[in-house]
Image: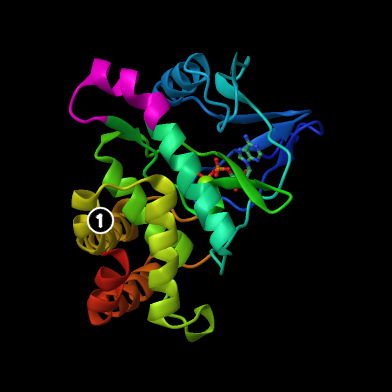
Amino acid sequence: MFADEEADPSEVILGGGRLTPGVVKIGETVRRPKSVFTRTLLLHLAQAGFDGVPKYLGCDELDRDILAFLPGDVPAKWRALTDDQVAAAGALLRRFHEASRALADHLGDGPVICHNDAGPNNTVFRHGRPIAFIDFDFAAVGDPLEDVAYMAWSWCISSKPARGDAASQAHQVRVLADAYGLSTAQRTRLVDAVYERLIRNERFWTARAFTGPPVISGPSPAEVLAWTSTEKAFVARFQRVFTAALA
Ligand SMILES: Nc1ncnc2c1ncn2[C@@H]1O[C@H](COP(=O)(O)OP(=O)(O)O)[C@@H](O)[C@H]1O
Ligand SMILES: [Mg+2]
């Protein structure tokens, strides 16, 4: 913003996000930098009858997307969640994927649209229950297992001792797999997919550390990389525990 520009008093900056500058609330709407893919995806999902995402409401005079603001809580940080919350998130992800199939068919390259960032920090909870996903900047055609793997990590798995032992986390990954309705073949690939997702995370944050704009809030890319490396070691160490719980 230039020195002589004043902030629009009707705009409330929405905190909690780490990557996208300029996410604001005006009345019951959210304004975000324009994304043609987000618009296409949200309009498609609405047409398919899926209500677990904000409605796309158009574009404003500053060329920003206008999305419906969804009342509820969006946790800024990952944290321990109950089995019921994990199950509801898994079922929501499955409905998201199913509703996206026709668009993915049209685009080619994969059976569904993956959200690719469906952590608790991009989920609206209402009365403690996950009811919608937000933030579709990484959404793309892909393999549904990639999203389930990221959800297994971001919702169920953590190397922090306060988050419980690997056996109880593995049980929760099983809850997620059951709620999503993963096939037997997909279950056998899930733990590897979690590990691959951690490697993908490292690649993203390595690139971001060298070339990206700074994060808006929270840990630096270097701190995220150190933490991801610890998480990778945790998943590798308890691979058998996670695999057994899914069998
Ligand atoms: N449609 C929405 N309804 C309710 N809250 C939202 C919505 N969109 C964004 N937010 C809030 O704004 C924050 C930042 O938005 P987000 O799209 O996740 O940006 P970032 O890419 O920075 O993570 C979210 O963490 C959430 O608290
Ligand atoms: Mg976000």
Say whether residue 222 is visible: yes
Q: Farthest right residue?
A: 9
Magenta: main secondary structure equals: helix
Q: Does residue 138 appear left or right of residue 85 in this picture?
A: left
Q: Pointer 1: residues within 10 angstroms few (<14), some, or many (20+)? A: many
The residue nearer to you, when weighing 181 against 148, is: 181
Relative image position of residue 98 (x, y in whole percent): 38, 29
Q: Split into 4 quadrants, where in the image is the C terminus?
A: bottom left
Identify the magenta region: 98-111
Q: Split into 4 quadrants, where in the image is the N terminus?
A: top right
The residue nearer to you, when weighing 66 against 64, is: 66
Q: Secondary structure at mark 1?
A: helix
For badge 1, the amino acid type reads: Arg
Location of residue 85 by image quarter? bottom right
Q: Does residue 17 appear left or right of residue 237 in this picture?
A: right
Location of residue 2 by image quarter? top right
Say whether residue 216 is visible: no
Q: Is residue 14 above or below residue 204?
A: above
Residue beneath the point at 21% across and 31% down: 110
Q: Which residue is mark 1?
A: 187
